[in-house]
Image (tube, coloured by chain):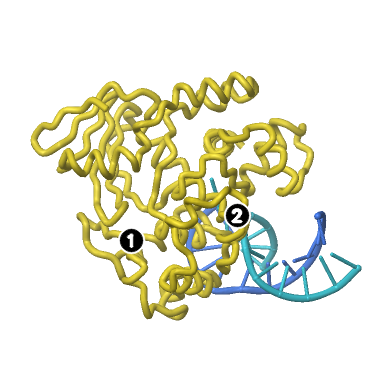
Chain colours: A yellow, B cyan, C blue
Amino acid sequence: MKYTHRDNNIILTDIPDFNLAQTIECGQCFHFIRKDLPEEDDSRSEYTLAAFGRGLRVAQDGDTFTFYDTKAEDFEKLWIPYFDLDRDYGMIKDFIIERNPELREIVEKNAGIRLLNQDFFETLLSFIISQNNRIPQIKKVVADISATWGRKVGDDLYSFPEPGELEGVCAADFKEKKTGFRAAYLCDAVSKVLSGEISGEELKRLELDECEKKLCEIKGVGPKVANCIMLFSLGKREAFPIDVWMKRVLEQVYFGGKEKSKPELAAFAKDKYGEYGGYAQQYLFAYAREEL
DNA sequence: CTCCAGGGATCAG
DNA sequence: CTGATCCATGGA
């Protein structure tokens, strides 16, 4: 990874297959603020985001990425893994398109997506919150929970609380954050993590099916949420979350619009995309939200 | 007013 | 296994 260090900023060029806006706004993370930029300038985008107890201001201008106020050590240890910058997405996309030519346009429309490697605990709670909810509302709840129990890590930006910071927080407290019926689920998740019954490190070592099964022991975690957690925070890139959008796009692309059940589609996707399921899923999801 | 949101728990058949 | 209903909350 080649980059330069200037005025406390990390400047990154020559990084292919990476678009900041596509990566941050494709529905895999909720803990960010997009900076309003004058005019609709597609070539520039800027965000502040929180991850792993840190805040980050980052911008893309053409093929130049700027990580503001970032030390080389943090860039190497935090942000390269977080943005998955060490991975060869050109190879991944070629592989997907070669085996699934019907996905060519869909992949190329969002060719700059990278799958983030997020914190397990934050991803677990965030995707419990996501169930039967809308992205703006999810973002609001995540920001509110962070502002209440996390630490200040930037202007109007707070880290997502660690498990220990939520010790003693009960369902009534979560309800005040507009989590609705998910409040009890969040309590169960927090208590299982605090007790050690659920551990991100242990889950990483499990096979996909075993990992999903274990995650589904948490109240409010079903197949879709479990697969999001595995894909976005446990490094399981063969995971394949199926929500209403994935259902729609798969039915449209492969079944002429005919209805299929989610378990049916899950088996279909596993057979079709195999270990690249997670990547295919994210290109399909972004396409579905834009075009369907 | 109704309908629905990156679903899941629960219960019926 | 499959399907129906309910779950809080907010926006269209």
The image shows residue A71, relative to residue A219, as above or below, that is above
Of marks 1 and 2, the one in the foreground? 2
Near mark 1 (Cα within 10 A), the count class, few <14, some 14-19 or many ≥20, is many
Residue at coordinates 50% horizontally, 46% vertically from top-left?
Answer: A231
Residue at coordinates 67% horizontally, 41% vertically from top-left?
Answer: A248
**Amino acid beneath label 1:** Phe
Residue at coordinates 41% horizontally, 71% vertically from top-left?
Answer: A194
Q: Is residue A106 left or right of residue A4?
A: right
Point out which mark residue A229 bears.
Answer: none
On-image quarter of the C terminus of chain A: top right
Q: How far apart are marks 1 and 2 (CA)?
A: 27 Å
Residue at coordinates 29% horizontally, 23% vertically from top-left?
Answer: A63
Tag 1, which secondary structure?
Answer: loop
Is A200 or A248 nearer to us in this picture?
A: A200
Is A153 or A115 nearer to us in this picture?
A: A115
Residue occupied by mark 2: A210
- Residue A126 at what x, y percent from top left? 45, 58
Is A220 or A277 nearer to us in this picture?
A: A277
Tag 2, which secondary structure?
Answer: helix
**Label pair 1/2, CB-CB below 8 angstroms:** no
Residue occupied by mark 1: A160
